[in-house]
Amino acid sequence: MFLSSQGWIRGTIVGAYQLAITIGLLVAAIVNNATKDRDNTGSYRIPVAVQFVWAIILVAGMLVLPETPRFLIKQDKHEAAAKSLARLRRIDIGDQAIVEELAEIQANHDYEMSVGKATYLEIFRGSIGRRLATGCGVQALQQLAGVNFIFYYGTTFFEHSGIKDGFIITLITNIVNVVSTFPGLYMVEKWGRQPLLMFGAVSMCVSQLIVAIVGTATSSDVSNKVLIAFLVGACCLGGDWRALFSQSPCQMSLQSKVFFIWGGFCFIAAVFVYTCIYETKGLSLEEVDELYHKVPVAWKSKGFVPSSNYADMMDALPCHN
């Protein structure tokens, strides 16, 4: 329901989704560690069975989750939209805040309808195309950062690196992963999206290059200590940068050298954040639309001040003029 959340808390709500993922990884690590010594099918049946619990909870939650007001407005179900928004905001349906927010959503919808019909090609053009490219870029780079490799194949990787009990190290990295998510929930609204992602990308780049250099230039005992220390740091500082390529088990043979690859992608991620990530802290979705129409480049987005209402936004948009 983050699409219906208010701008001041939307980033935290999305971050809470990340928190659920990190907690899930931690539970998986605990269950795997508890069943690793079983000499029967329970060693894999139990971990698989635990996953069904969360799936059932998710399905049950979806059954009681209200539809988004924006979708209901598009369906001309204004009364249902008002009830949904009032439920989400936990205030009376006749409250002035509900009336004003619905008016903004309706104005947005009316403007979209006034532009005319669009084809699927429109998602690749203009500000919509920039937003699509940004989303794809973030998704690709977070999958190239290297962190998920540790969570998927960490136990085997640690043991191949000479660390005796890979399960314990994996458990530690997952605990750090959960704990470090909480500061991110605060900082995403305090710092903003762009600074937090930049901090994570640069920190991970430095940490992974240190691991790579020490791992290829020193003895296994020293490199293992550095590996654990800075790997934990990378998990802590990564934020939303998650590890397609980094999930490939073929990288196991590269040992510490693989961190050169991940560090390089983290550097690319830092450049991408500066040039492509617009700062949307505190903005409603309608104000984000205005931001992309008015501000041509991402690094100028921090100084953006939205119009007071969507009627002003419509007058400001080039395609409306």
Image (cartoon, helix red, strand yellow):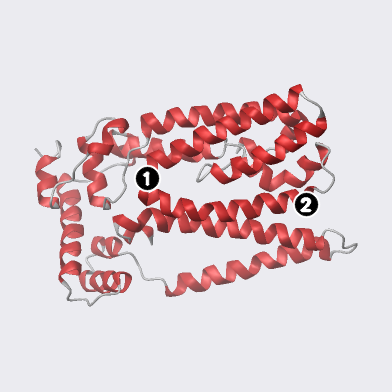
- Where disc 2 sits, the SS reads helix
Q: Is residue 298 left or right of residue 62?
A: left
Q: Residue at x 37, y 32 (%)?
A: 276
Q: Residue 108 has which mark?
A: none
Quarter of the figure that contains the C terminus = top left
Q: How far across and down, in percent of the image, does residue 216 sit?
A: 74, 24
Label 2 sits on residue? 167
Q: Is residue 3 left or right of residue 266?
A: left
Res 222 seen here: yes
- Front residue (pair 206, 307): 206
Q: Nearer the viewer, mark 1 or mark 2?
A: 1
Amino acid found under the numbered disc labelled 2? Phe
Quarter of the figure that contains the N terminus = bottom left
- Front residue (pair 247, 78): 247
Q: Is residue 205 above or below residue 196?
A: above
Q: How far across and down, in percent of the image, does residue 107 sit?
A: 15, 56
Q: Quadrant of residue 78?
A: bottom left
Q: Quadrant of residue 224?
A: top right
- Where disc 1 sits, the SS reads loop
Q: Is residue 264 left or right of residue 184?
A: right
Mark 2 Cα shell of 10 Å, populated few (<14), some (14-19), many (≥20)? many
Q: How many marks?
A: 2
Label 1 sits on residue? 191
Q: Is residue 75 above or below residue 268?
A: below
Q: How far across and down, in percent of the image, does residue 190 sit?
A: 36, 49
The answer to whether the residue labelled 1 contacts the one labelled 2, judged by CB atoms less than 8 Å apart, is no
Mark 1 Cα shell of 10 Å, populated few (<14), some (14-19), many (≥20)? few
Q: Residue at x 74, y 34 (%)?
A: 250
First in sequence: mark 1 or mark 2?
A: 2
